[in-house]
Image: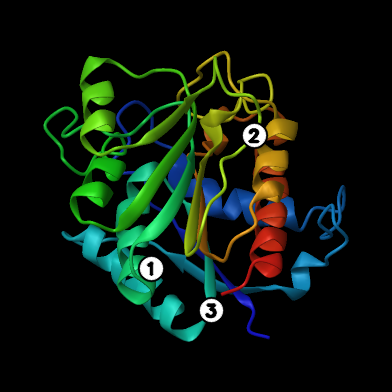
Amino acid sequence: MNPIALLGIAYDEKSSFLRGPAEAPAAIRRALASDSANSWSEDGRDTSLMLEDCGDLRGFSKDPISEIETFVAKSVDEFAQVLVLGGDHSISFPSVSAVAKKHGPLTIVHFDAHPDLYDEFEGDRFSHACPFARIMEGDHAKRLIQIGIRTANVHQREQAAKFNVETYEARNWKSQLPAVEGPVYISVDLDVLDPAFAPGVSHHEPGGLSTRELLNAIQSINAPIVATDVVELNPTRDLNDVTAMVAAKVVKELAAAMSRNRI
């Protein structure tokens, strides 16, 4: 059985408010190795046996989007599944693009406080506020499901309607995912969580999910999962590594879900 490739993308140049997520892959790895916890998922799987660390991409040139896509594509070709540690959310566009070119249009389950559907943000079409607009324009997704949204303005609501996005706003979500079919790509922006659970993010947006609700949702997915990402941890804002530990917990449960739901 092939391991899951663990990739780090140390990139935050498309962050609109604060820098810091470039340091997240290292922080998540430290949390995964912390003696305060172990490597086992909640359903009794040793995730250390599932993951093969393929290192980090850092030191970008003038075309980071292409570099990220190439980096992810290499592991997609070599391994059956990839788990990507961002970085800011801009990394999801090239990551999804690489995976979709291998597996075809994806069902994307996207956890976030923000829709990230801007056509452009502050003059940048590749901002971390725009990846899902680029993904949908590129026909990389046959279905986009967004959970935890609580910041959508008029433009982003129009974009969601344009792209037929299935939106589950935090205020209305009943902690139950719709049924999905593979291949599935899961993208977890840690600010989907209420700041009480994840203070180490750049954009504190009150009224979010609990860690338990997020984990339950991930564990409920019953379809082939080809790739996942965890983004927007900002270690410069974290408190006693609480958010890094949450990220590590999410990584372990994603790895377990990927192991249960192989291609």
**Element under label 1?**
helix
- Upstream in the sequence, badge 1 or badge 3? 3
Q: CA distance from mark 2 to mark 1?
A: 26 Å
The residue carrying mark 1 is: 99
Q: Please name the residue shown 25% across and 39% down the image.
A: 163
Q: Please name the residue shown 76% across and 58% down the image.
A: 33
Q: CA distance from mark 3 to mark 2?
A: 28 Å
- From this viewpoint, is residue 84 visible? no
Residues at discs 2 and 1 in contact (Cβ within 8 Å): no
- From this viewpoint, is residue 136 visible? yes
Task: Answer with the quarter of the image where residue 155 lies.
Answer: top left
Tell me where residue 108 appears, x and y as whole percent. Answer: 43, 50
Q: Seen in the image, is 2 located left or right of residue 43?
A: left
Give the farthest residue toward the left. Answer: 123
Query: Disc 3 marks which amino acid?
Result: Ala
Which is more toward the observer, 232 or 110? Answer: 110
The residue carrying mark 2 is: 176
Which is more toward the observer, 205 or 20? Answer: 205
- Upstream in the sequence, badge 2 or badge 1? 1
In the rendered image of this protein, does residue 172 appear above or below residue 124? Answer: above
In the rendered image of this protein, does residue 65 appear above or below residue 115? Answer: below
Residues at discs 3 and 2 in contact (Cβ within 8 Å): no
Q: CA distance from mark 1 to mark 3?
A: 10 Å
Query: Disc 1 marks which amino acid?
Result: Val
Quarter of the picture containing the C terminus is bottom right
**Element under label 2?**
loop
Q: Please name the residue shown 25% across and 48% down the image.
A: 136
In the rendered image of this protein, does residue 232 appear above or below residue 95? Answer: above
Q: Seen in the image, is 215 located left or right of residue 139?
A: right
For marks 2 and 1, give the one nearer the viewer. 2
The residue carrying mark 3 is: 80
Tell me where residue 202 appears, x and y as whole percent. Answer: 46, 27
